[in-house]
Image: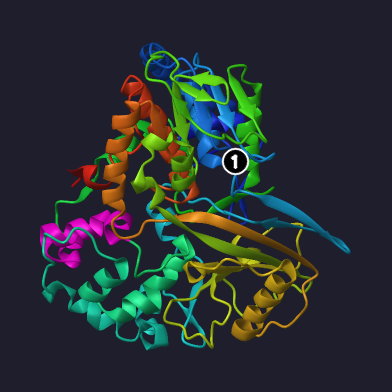
């Protein structure tokens, strides 16, 4: 089931009720069919009421892209507007996008590698913080264990990575508030100004490598951390924002939590205290289950190996204005990377703001060693900050995941790790390492940082091109311009969804799919998918 994804988890649990989910190494049972069915009936009654109005304008919907956003979009359409025909187009022969679990054989067995996302996080503070497992930052030439308790926080002040951090935090409240006329700012500049460059570049830049594979000096604080941006404007200090009695949260977060809390109470209770969880057969279990349910629905058509060459739009055809290679549709939802979506639009309707959204390429190298407990430390893994010298990070590694510790598989007795390289470091790169070169680079990283020189018995290399969109400074302004252009050119009949706009994580993609489908239905088919983002973010007091 999709837990913690702001999805209708109780309904989707029916789809995945035979799948086994793991929280660290502990099995989490799926809610009983009776609970899931009762919840499904409530959801079906709610969605069928809305779908009556939706079918007046939605005659046929095209979903572009068969990644997790596209699959989730088609799934929500099948639940919220069950009478509307949906066609999903995917250029590749496989579905699931960046979610790709691959089993690799070696002499004596096989190992499961993840080429993309490997865990999900519960919709909880624990899921956001994920601090129960040891996590490290490599700086400047050693592993620094991040604190996960009050005592370890005090002891960590002696670590190289923590030098200058505490003083910046304690004096933050004394720092001058920015000019309210400043439209946006890089996260690196923001943290250096409010706290200290040490916090920004030795710690937070590493975190940005782990989440976005991005450059802290280009990523937008206003987009990625709108509450921090707001707290400085409203309270003059981030610390005052934390301690104020009037706690503000984004309206849509509060509303969605209230809507889904009842149906998902049992699942949320079981997730209490969980930091991450995963499927025992790999993350692709999720996309396969979605595909299975969609394929069984006679109202859903899935076309793989079917790249869309272009989108034709005929205003005079008020019923089915879109033509996709001869297929007629009343609405189109594109979950493709924003610049790709832009190239498919009619030349006269192309949107410059979409073409300006960037993405980074990440090289993922999976390694499996026959020796158990090969690593010198246990934990989730380590990240490298931007401030690490080139001599300590010659291959532009972003981080290393200790898969054997973070997502253990009972059938694998050896040591499994994943090395991630590239990201923003490879922004202007036109050629990439071969698979053999990639494995050697990854082994060199492990030898340099962890002292591991053993040869792996199984390897896998995946070059994920343009896999993580970058919300660089000015992203909110681009979203605003794109929304206006979509309304002007397509009257709200062409919507966009996916990681190019409002969150790059798997959870974000599922939530975004739900929001777009819900928005289309509640607005009678006139919705861009960009409503509520950027400058349209509304805050409510939750204290």
> Which of 212/236 is in front?
212
Relative image position of residue 318 (x, y in whole percent): 38, 14
Relative image position of residue 478 (x, y in whole percent): 30, 49
Establish if 136 lies above or below 540: below
Establish if 357 lies above or below 15: below
Establish if 496 lies above or below 387: above
Q: Which stretch appears magenta?
A: 220-243
Q: In the displayed structure, does residue 370 sit left or right of residue 404?
A: right
Q: In the displayed structure, does residue 203 sit left or right of residue 121?
A: left
Establish if 56 lies above or below 504: above
Q: Residues within 10 Å of mark 1 (few under 14, many from 20)?
A: some
Q: Quadrant of residue 165?
A: bottom left
For the point 37% across and 69% down, the residue is 216
Q: Which residue is mark 1?
A: 29
> Which of 148/426 is in front?
426
For the point 35% across and 33% down, the residue is 528
Q: Quadrant of residue 173?
A: bottom left
Q: How is the image coloured?
A: rainbow
Q: In the displayed structure, does residue 68 sit left or right of residue 146?
A: right
Q: In this rendering, does residue 35 appear at all? A: no
For the point 13% across and 75% down, the residue is 175
């Amino acid at each position: 089931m999709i837990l913690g994804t702001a999805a209708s988890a109780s309904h989707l649990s029916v789809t995945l009720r035979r799948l086994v989910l793991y929280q660290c190494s502990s099995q989490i049972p799926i809610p009983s069919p009776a609970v899931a069915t009762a919840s499904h009936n409530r959801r079906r009654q709610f969605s069928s009421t809305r779908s009556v109005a939706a079918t007046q304008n939605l005659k046929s919907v095209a979903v572009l892209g068969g990644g997790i956003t596209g699959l989730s979009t088609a799934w929500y359409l099948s639940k919220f507007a069950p009478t509307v025909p949906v066609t999903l187009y995917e250029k590749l022969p496989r579905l699931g996008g960046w979610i790709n679990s691959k089993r690799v054989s070696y002499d004596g067995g096989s190992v499961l590698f993840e080429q993309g996302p490997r865990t999900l996080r519960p919709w909880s503070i624990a899921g956001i913080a994920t601090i129960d497992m040891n996590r490290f930052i490599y700086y400047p030439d050693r592993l620094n264990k991040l604190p996960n308790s009050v005592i370890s926080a005090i002891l960590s002040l002696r670590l190289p990575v923590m030098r200058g951090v505490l003083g910046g935090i304690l004096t933050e409240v004394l720092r001058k508030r920015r000019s309210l006329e400043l439209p946006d700012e890089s996260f690196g500049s923001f943290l250096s100004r409010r706290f200290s460059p040490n916090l920004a570049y030795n710690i937070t830049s590493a975190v940005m490598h782990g989440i976005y594979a991005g450059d802290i000096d280009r990523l937008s604080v206003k987009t990625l951390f709108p509450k921090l941006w707001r707290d400085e404007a409203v309270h003059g200090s981030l610390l005052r924002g934390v301690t104020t009695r009037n706690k503000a949260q984004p309206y849509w977060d509060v509303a969605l939590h209230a809507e889904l809390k009842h149906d998902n109470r049992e699942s949320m209770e079981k997730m209490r205290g969980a930091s991450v969880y995963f499927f025992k057969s790999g993350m692709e279990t999720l996309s396969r289950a979605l595909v299975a349910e969609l394929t069984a629905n006679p109202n859903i058509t899935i076309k793989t190996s079917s790249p869309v060459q272009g989108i034709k739009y005929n205003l005079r055809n008020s019923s089915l204005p879109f033509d996709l290679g001869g297929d007629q549709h009343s609405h189109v939802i594109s979950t493709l990377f924003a610049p790709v979506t832009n190239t498919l639009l009619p030349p006269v309707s192309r949107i410059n703001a979409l073409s300006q959204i960037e993405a980074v390429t990440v090289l993922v190298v999976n390694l499996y060693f026959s020796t158990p407990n090969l690593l010198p430390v246990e934990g989730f893994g380590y990240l490298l900050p931007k401030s690490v010298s080139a001599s300590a990070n010659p291959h532009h590694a972003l981080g290393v995941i200790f898969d054997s510790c973070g997502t253990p598989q009972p059938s694998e007795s050896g040591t499994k790790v994943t090395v991630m390289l590239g990201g923003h470091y490879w922004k202007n790169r036109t050629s990439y390492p071969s698979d053999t070169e990639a494995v050697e680079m990854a082994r060199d990283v492990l030898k340099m940082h962890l002292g591991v020189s053993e040869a792996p018995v199984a390897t896998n290399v995946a070059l994920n091109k343009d896999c993580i969109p970058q919300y660089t400074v000015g992203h909110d302004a681009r979203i605003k311009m794109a929304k206006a252009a979509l309304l002007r050119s397509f009257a709200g009949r062409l919507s966009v969804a996916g990681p190019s706009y409002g969150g790059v994580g798997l959870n974000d993609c599922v939530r975004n799919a739900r929001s777009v489908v819900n928005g289309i239905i509640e607005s009678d088919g006139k919705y861009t998918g960009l409503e509520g983002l950027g400058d349209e973010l509304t805050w409510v007091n939750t204290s």
